[in-house]
Image (cartoon, rainbow, N blue to C red):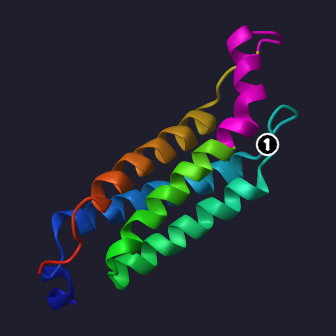
Amino acid sequence: MNEFLNKKTTFWYISCVSMVLALVGLIVYVVRGGNSYSPVSGTAVAVWAVGIVLNAVVLVKDFKIGQFIPYLLYVVTLGVLLNTEMLFASNVLVSIDGGFFDVAWIAFVVCLVLAIVAGYVASVKPLTKE
C-alpha cells in the first residue's frame, strides 16, 4: 500500500477529494429527495454515479485520458441539474410562495461545484509519478 501511495502525485489526492465531494453531493441530493418543483432526476443520478465510479477506477488504474472523464461527467451532471432545478430556484428567487434554499440543496450544489473544480485541477497533470 505504501508503495502504491508513494507513486502518486498531489493531483491523485486532489482527484480523491473530487470523488469524495461528488459522492457526498450525490448522497445529499438523493436523501434530500425532490419536491413539486424539482423531482429527483434519474439522469443526473446515473451520470453522477458513473462519474464517481470512473473516478475510482482512474484512481486505482491510472490511464491518462481517463482523468478527464469523471470531470466531464460531473459537468454534464451540473448541466442536467441546472435544467431540473431551474423551476425550484426561480420559485425561491422570486419568492412566489415563501420557499427557500434548504441546507441540503445548498450542500449538494456546493459539493458538485467543488468536485468539478477539483476534478479539473486533478485532470491537468499526471496522477502517477513517472
Nearer the observer, 102 or 8? 8
Q: Which residue is mark 1?
A: 34
Q: Is residue 19 magenta?
A: no
81 lies left or right of 59: right
Amino acid identity at mark 1 = Gly
- Among the 4 quarters of the image, the one containing residue 57: bottom left
Return the residue found at the far front: 65
Q: Position of residue 74 (x, y in %)?
A: 52, 54
Residue found at x 44% / y 70%: 55
98 lies left or right of 118: right
Q: Position of residue 32 (x, y in %)?
A: 70, 45
Residue found at x 66% / y 36%: 82
Nearer the observer, 123 or 110? 123
The C terminus is located in which quarter? bottom left
Q: Position of residue 20 (x, y in %)?
A: 43, 61
- Among the 4 quarters of the image, the one containing residue 49: bottom right
Magenta stretch in the rendered image:
81-98
Q: On screen, 14 above or below 111?
A: below
Return the residue found at the far right: 36
Q: On screen, 91 above or below 129?
A: above
Q: On screen, 18 above or below 98?
A: below
Residue found at x 36% / y 85%: 61
Q: Residues within 10 Å of mark 1 (few under 14, many from 20)?
A: some
124 lies left or right of 110: left
85 lies left or right of 24: right
Does the magenta stretch mainly form a helix, a strand or a loop? helix
The N terminus is located in which quarter? bottom left
Count the marks: 1
Local secondary structure at mark 1: loop
